[in-house]
Image (cartoon, rainbow, N blue to C red):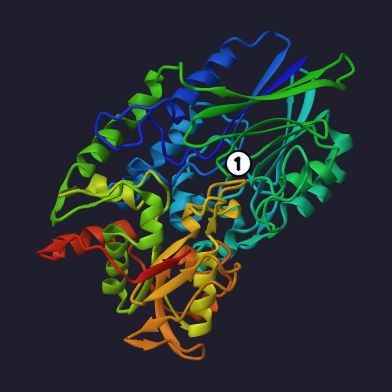
Amino acid sequence: MKIRILSTSDVHGYFYPTDFSTVDDQHELGFFKAASLIKQKRRQASADEIVLYIENGDIIEGSPMDAYAYNTKDQTNYSQKIVSMINSLTPDAAVLGNHEFNYGLNYLSDVFKKRTYSILGANISGPNAKRIIDASYRIIEKKGVKLAIIGLTTQFIPHWEDPKNIEGLHFASALETLKKIVSKLRNQVDVLIVAYHGGFEADLDSGVPTEKYTGENEGSAILREIPEIDALVTGHQHRREAGLVNGIPVNQPGYRGSDVGEIVLELNDDKQLIQSSAQLLSVDKYDLPTDLKEIAADWYEATQAWLDQPVTTISGDMRLTDHMAARLYGHPYLDLVNRVQMDATGAKISGTSLFNDGVRGFGKNVTVRNVMNSYVYPNTLVVEKVTGADLRAALERCASFFELADDGSIKVSFAFRTPKVEFYNYDYYTGIDYSFDLKKPVGHRVGPIFFDEAELLDEQEVEVVLNQYRGVGGGDYSMFGADKIVREYADDMPKLIIQYLQNHSEIVAEQPHNLQIIK
């Protein structure tokens, strides 16, 4: 008997094979292509084969379609199409990702209200858990084989998420929760599968830690400390991984539906596991299923029309062609985003990120599409009252983003490149003048900070506007935190950027000169 476990993870609202950079853009990705692959695998299954499908989280946030569904007056109609499409694949289980919580519990529960499958969350508890979680695990019996699927979500969500969005929820360690459940279930089932929206904190081959241990990613510890499990499906880090670790098949199927994860378990006649494998299946050769296209067609067309709405005309050039230079020396686009944040909140200091190297910035004619493709997260804003010492610590974290190569050139430091590229954890600031001396050791690179034409003292208090993710300490910025928030704002940044551009008669692209790099 073969058990084939198929999985999708971190689709982030990319249902069609497009990244929406242009109206006719096409790529080899998307939930629709993954769905065709999954349907084909089911059709081709032999009589002695069980095919399972697990949706492993982060599907309702991340794309222009998701953003349009949330912001339109027809919110319920469009957003519930997500669950209709998932329902069509009859998942055996699903897990919530951290980004499922970005729009709040009311929206989350509304999106998944009509689900015909079980959402599993063994390590999520609290008075509101039943609104979004069906069970900790599910036991299925197929063709005489008893299988258990345990669902887990990264415990680190409270370190990123707006507290209002996770009110009445508690997130426990996936590792410790799993230990308790495995000890209970192992002798009750033939096969034990774990679906975890979280990733790996150590190298899969050597076991050497690849990040500071925070509990965000516990996949490596699960593989090391719980050998009783038969398969591990992961996500969250957007990595493409597949293989055997400590004899356990494990995978992580990329980002935006680029791949479907496949784990194959082979049992003998006594239902004992005798062989296992893991791989990723590319979706590139698959067509779009007609039934799913029919569900989403009006939503897709409405999104494309919305994206092509004009916003403003810019004097000058805010296009990004050298992302490294923009991070090192500032850029008109980054300066604009900071000024939007300052205008919306009244703060005089602002920090923002260039989230990835796909951000294009703005040319002369700006549309909604340009905004959504440049500011890709639905971040809201917070203003924090911090000391000069806090701000200096944040800038030291930013300065650690860079390192000098042997030839004296500047490159992104290893810690921000491995195991996951974290460009979004570097911030550029407006409202202060500051410098990084890259010849100095990490933690001692920031020179004097000037604010309002005077040096900012360590004990001096200032207000800083940040996105909510950074404001609660996300990205290892422990100098910020919810306890320092003095004001919060409900509108998300793409909306604020559009409003700012529409409300200002003249937008001029100007290169900032407030950050000095010494090497």
| Residue 182 picture quarter | top right
Is residue 479 in view? yes
* Amino acid type, residue under disc 1 in the picture: Gly
- Residue furthest out toward the front: 407
Residue 68 pos. (x, y %): 31, 46
Q: Nearer the viewer, residue 416 or 346?
A: 416
Q: Nearer the viewer, residue 230 or 493?
A: 493
Q: Residue at x 48, y 41 (%)?
A: 59
Is residue 75 in view? no
SS at mark 1 in the image: loop
Taking 134 as reference, is 252 above or below it?
A: above
Q: Nearer the viewer, residue 456 or 42?
A: 456
Q: Badge 1 local density, few (<14 within 10 Å), some, or many (20+)?
A: many
In the rendered image, the quadrant that contains the N terminus is top right
Disc 1 target residue: 235
| Residue 502 picture quarter | bottom left
| Residue 339 picture quarter | bottom left
Left or right: 360, with 160 as reference point: left
Left or right: 121, with 229 as reference point: left
Residue 158 pos. (x, y %): 58, 63
Taking 5 as reference, is 489 above or below it?
A: below
Left or right: 263, with 248 as reference point: left
Q: Residue at x 51, y 44 (%)?
A: 58
Residue 253 pos. (x, y %): 58, 33
Taking 177 as reference, is 190 above or below it?
A: above
Residue 433 pos. (x, y %): 37, 76
Q: Residue at x 46, y 90 (%)?
A: 460
Q: Nearer the viewer, residue 69 or 218?
A: 218
